[in-house]
Image: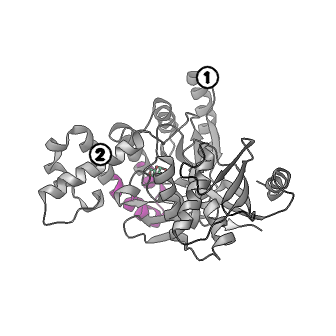
């Protein structure tokens, strides 16, 4: 995306003046799904697609004038209005501004125009890209950049919780803020320690296949999944008052089995997936360190199986894409992100790439009447000021 494109709209829709331009990416995740809010590990990376915003203080006390370039939609609102704007895209601006104020940033009225090239509803975190882009801008314009990167991550997450109805974890906002070109990141969501992993697999590449089934997390079973996990933890805690169980990360397989009957089969299956996924992320790290990409791929297939059968966040189209990958001999494939639609992420040998994409397009089209979209993964940088 070009700065000039965003700038020309900013100038046209406001008073002709220019502001500062900020960018934040969407993300992929190699493995570690639904583990973030369970205190486990995740393995995301930022992508070369995201959100770009031009912003400038407008001299008012608390009036925000916002323009969504892609939607050609203009919304003005006051930060002091307790209800906030109705348009879902404007709620991200409203929410992050109030969260940054809570962190001590003296946010006043501002103008903002933004655009994005991260596909919406594809499970690549277009919403985290917005939150971290706007947080980065507000921190720079009003906060002398005093808010730390981690606090911006948490402000983005709080925006989802408090203004958008999604009880998400910290993976997406973390990846968007901390991303680094060419590197995946292994994050321990309990301690918040993380490591950059240069990712340049020799002879393999990552590609996303977008089913174009819109994934929408707000008000969705996403929050139910989180409740299931928390419910299991409460039962384990009640059985073991001597211990401290905050998330499923603190629980063992034996403890899970002990509460199986009382939590019921559905909750049990959810927690079982999470415990397995926690171990898989660590196994993927070991395999990457040994350059064993076939092992990484095997673990990705296991994740898909668990997300589909136990966590139940897949859908027919994504299972179909996963199945095609398997039949084509693709090294690894799984649903990526929150689920309920969106993309599969595929680890493919270079020599198989063309044939796999052609087969997936043909078979998917024959069954669903349209082709999946194909995004080659380029791992890019995190939130930054462009000018
Ligand atoms: C969404 C959430 C994340 C994470 C993933 C699943 O992207 O925003 O916090 O829970 O789903 O791994």
In screen coordinates, is 334 left or right of 38?
right
* Residue 288 among those drawn in magenta: yes
Q: Position of residue 349 (x, y in %)?
A: 57, 49
> SS of the residue at dot 1?
loop
Location of the C terminus by quadrant is bottom right
Residue beneath disc 1:
369
| Tag 2 near tag 1, CB within 8 Å | no
The relative height of residue 287 versus residue 342 in the rendered view (above or below) is: below
The relative height of residue 103 versus residue 87 in the rendered view (above or below) is: below
> SS of the residue at dot 2?
helix
The disc label shown at residue 247, or none: none
Of 344 and 288, which appears nearest the observer? 344
Q: Position of residue 338 (x, y in %)?
A: 46, 46
Q: Is residue 201 visible?
A: no
Quarter-of-image position of residue 385: bottom right
Task: Write the start and end of the magenta stretch as one range.
Answer: 277-298
Q: Position of residue 60 (x, y in %)?
A: 72, 62
Of 222 and 300, which appears nearest the observer? 222
In screen coordinates, is 242 left or right of 340?
left
Disc 1 packing (10 Å; few <14; some 14–19; many ≥20): few
> Label 2 vs label 1: CA separation?
36 Å
The relative height of residue 226 versus residue 154 in the rendered view (above or below) is: above
Disc 2 packing (10 Å; few <14; some 14–19; many ≥20): some
Of 28 and 346, which appears nearest the observer? 28
Residue beneath disc 2:
228
Return the disc, 2 or 1, that comes first in the chain's sequence: 2
Q: Main secondary structure of the magenta part?
A: helix
The relative height of residue 228 versus residue 38 in the rendered view (above or below) is: above
Q: Residue at x 49, y 58 (%)?
A: 157
Q: Residue at x 30, y 49 (%)?
A: 229
Q: Residue at x 65, y 51 (%)?
A: 77
Q: Residue at x 68, y 56 (%)?
A: 64
């Amino acid at each position: 995306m070009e700065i000039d494109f965003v700038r020309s709209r900013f100038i046209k829709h406001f008073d002709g003046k220019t502001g500062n331009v900020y960018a934040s990416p969407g993300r992929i995740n190699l493995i570690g799904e639904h583990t973030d809010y369970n205190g486990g590990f995740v393995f995301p990376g930022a992508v070369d697609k995201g959100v770009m915003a031009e912003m400038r203080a407008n001299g008012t006390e608390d009036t925000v004038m916002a323009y969504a370039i892609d939607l050609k939609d203009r919304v003005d609102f006051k930060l002091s209005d307790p209800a906030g704007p109705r348009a879902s895209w404007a709620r991200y601006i409203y929410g992050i501004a109030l969260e940054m104020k809570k962190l001590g940033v003296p946010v006043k009225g501002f103008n903002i125009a933004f655009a994005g090239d991260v596909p919406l509803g594809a499970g690549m975190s277009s919403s985290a890209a917005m939150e971290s882009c706007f947080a980065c801008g507000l921190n720079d314009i009003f906060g002398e950049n005093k808010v730390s990167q981690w606090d911006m991550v948490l402000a983005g997450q709080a925006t989802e919780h408090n203004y958008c109805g999604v009880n998400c974890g910290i993976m997406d906002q973390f990846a968007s803020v901390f991303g680094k070109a060419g590197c995946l990141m292994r994050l321990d969501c309990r301690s918040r320690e993380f490591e950059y992993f240069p990712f340049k697999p020799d002879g393999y590449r990552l590609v996303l296949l977008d089913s174009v089934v819109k994934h929408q997390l707000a008000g969705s079973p996403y929050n139910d999944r989180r409740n299931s996990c928390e419910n299991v933890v409460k039962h384990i805690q009640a059985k073991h008052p001597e211990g401290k169980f905050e998330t499923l990360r603190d629980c063992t397989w034996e403890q899970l089995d002990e509460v199986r009957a009382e939590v019921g089969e559905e909750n049990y299956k959810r927690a079982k997936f999470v415990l397995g996924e926690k171990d898989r992320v660590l196994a993927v790290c070991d395999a990457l360190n040994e350059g064993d990409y076939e092992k990484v791929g095997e673990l990705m297939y296991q994740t898909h199986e668990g997300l589909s059968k136990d966590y139940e966040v897949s859908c027919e189209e994504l299972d179909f894409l996963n199945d095609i990958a398997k039949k084509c001999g693709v090294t690894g494939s799984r649903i990526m992100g929150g689920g309920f639609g969106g993309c599969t992420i595929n680890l493919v040998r270079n020599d198989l790439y063309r044939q796999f994409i052609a087969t997936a397009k043909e078979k998917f089209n024959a069954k669903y009447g349209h082709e999946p979209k194909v995004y080659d993964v380029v791992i890019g940088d995190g939130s930054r000021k462009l000018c």
